């Protein structure tokens, strides 16, 4: 196997989880050229990844004729590359067209019910049929592709790969120094792309106070999204109204690039957050963490780490089915999780 293309067109966390497959392929075919096709905004998470030789991207902001021209260029580039294998891990039509047009001898698809059509299936030579939803982790689902390379996907535990770069590690060190964070600190990322994945602000503030009592400084982060910024500022305000026990609390919401966030995560003592990309980043870096989950497929999207504790809202009250969620609904569905359960999970994880 000399040349392999893997297509993973998904959000940051999903794409990061696919790096376990890249590691597995390079481990079995160390001399192969491994290229990936991902969304442009997720590329920072691959910086420094030793398993990837080339990156092609699709910019989701690109529309109309410009997008069509770009994707036609990808078709020609893939055909010219003469790949031995193309693996399409998601359900976008451009991936099926690229696989078909590549003429690679091995073309692997992940079965998706909404793509159960002859043209789709004929674009590939092999199909991976996953188990029912919730019975396997996303990392395990990606690794199932290995069987068609003649590799036992259960032969070894592969993990996502995230490598903070030196320049960002230096920036993180300087930023922490300037903020007066000179003790072991906890990074808390309380927000997510969708509000239904979020916990209550006042309860996160109580967790901040609890952690400062244990001697930790606190770093709050979030994306530049206005809703997330407002949430993080409210948590900061509530935490400052409580007792911080002389520790430092800084709010860097909206000011973190992904590479800088990775560097900060690598330096923190502990991570607390919800089902989001930073949770997967912390897991990839083997940072001890507590992750709060609501109506998601928990077994599929939990942190891929032995150093993580999941607190599931469904253990404390009824939740809607994951497939019934309206992502535009601002209701926070983790409200059933009691503060005490999170504080105990934090204490237990820190003790272990």
Image (cartoon, rainbow, N blue to C red):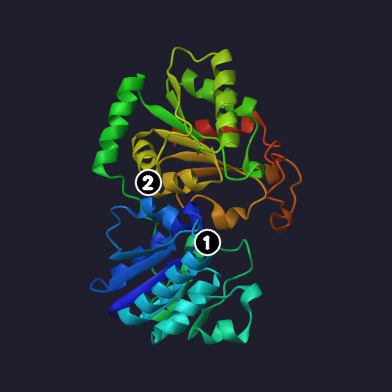
Q: Quadrant of the C terminus?
A: top left
Q: Is residue 154 left or right of residue 165?
A: right
Residue plotted at (30% across, 80% down): 1
Q: Find the distance from the CA under tag 1 to the CA under tag 2.
A: 35 Å
Q: Quadrant of residue 55?
A: bottom left
Near-viewer residue (259 or 51): 259
Choose mark 1 or mark 2, whichever is in front. Answer: 1
| Mark number displayed over residue 305 | none
Percent position of residue 315, x then y: 69, 44
First-in-chain label (1 vs 2): 1
| Total marks in image | 2
Taking depth in this image into account, of 334 and 229 the one nearest to the observer is 229
Say if 186 sits above or below 82 in the image. above
Whether tag 1 and tag 2 are in contact, CB under 8 A, the answer is: no
Q: Secondary structure at mark 2?
A: loop
Residue 13 image point, x, y percent: 48, 52
Callout 1 secondary element:
loop
> Residue 226: x percent and y percent?
57, 35
Residue appearing at x 40%, y 62% in the figure: 57
Residue 336 versus residue 77: which sits nearer the camera? 77
At x 60%, y 73%, the residue is 112
Which label is found at residue 63? 1
Residue 242 appears in the figure: no
Taking 202 as reference, is 217 left or right? left
Position of residue 1 relative to residue 346, above or below, is: below
Would you call the spot at circle 1 few (<14 residues within 10 Å), some (14-19), or many (20 or more)? Answer: few
x, y percent for residue 110: 53, 74
Q: Residue farthest to the front?
A: 65
What residue appears at the point 52 percent right and 43 percent down from the top-left corner?
Answer: 309
Q: Which mark is residue 285?
A: 2
Whether residue 124 is visible, yes or no, is yes
Relative to 126, is 202 on the left or the right?
Answer: right
């Amino acid at each position: 196997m000399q040349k392999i293309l893997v297509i993973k067109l998904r959000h940051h966390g999903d794409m990061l989880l696919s790096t376990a497959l890249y590691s597995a392929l390079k481990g079995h075919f160390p001399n192969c050229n491994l290229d990936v096709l991902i969304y442009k905004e997720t590329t920072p998470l691959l910086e420094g990844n030793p398993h990837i030789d080339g990156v092609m991207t699709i910019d989701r902001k690109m529309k109309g004729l410009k997008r069509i021209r770009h994707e036609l260029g990808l078709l020609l580039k893939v055909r010219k590359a003469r790949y031995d294998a193309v693996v399409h891990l998601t359900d976008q039509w451009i991936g099926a067209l690229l696989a078909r047009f590549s003429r690679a001898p091995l073309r692997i698809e992940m079965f998706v019910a909404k793509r159960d059509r002859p043209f789709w299936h004929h674009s590939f030579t092999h199909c991976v049929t996953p188990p029912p939803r919730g019975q396997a982790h996303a990392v395990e689902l990606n690794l199932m592709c290995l069987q068609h390379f003649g590799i036992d996907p259960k032969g070894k535990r592969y993990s996502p790969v995230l490598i903070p770069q030196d320049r960002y590690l230096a920036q993180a060190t300087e930023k922490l120094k300037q903020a007066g964070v000179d003790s072991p600190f906890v990074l808390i990322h309380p927000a997510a792309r969708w509000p239904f994945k979020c916990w209550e602000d006042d309860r996160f503030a109580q967790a901040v106070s609890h952690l400062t009592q244990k001697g930790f400084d606190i770093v709050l982060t979030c994306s530049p999204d206005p809703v997330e910024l407002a949430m993080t500022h409210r948590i900061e305000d509530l935490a400052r109204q409580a007792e911080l026990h002389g520790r430092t609390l800084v709010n860097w919401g909206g000011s973190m690039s992904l590479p800088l966030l990775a560097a900060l995560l690598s330096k923190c003592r502990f991570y607390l957050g919800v089902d989001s990309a930073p949770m997967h980043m912390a897991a990839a870096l083997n940072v001890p963490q507590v992750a709060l989950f609501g109506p998601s497929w928990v077994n599929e999207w939990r942190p891929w780490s032995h150093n993580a504790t999941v607190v599931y809202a469904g253990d404390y009250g009824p939740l809607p089915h994951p497939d019934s969620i309206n992502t535009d609904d601002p209701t926070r569905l983790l409200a059933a999780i009691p503060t005490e359960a999170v504080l105990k999970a934090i204490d237990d994880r820190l003790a272990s």
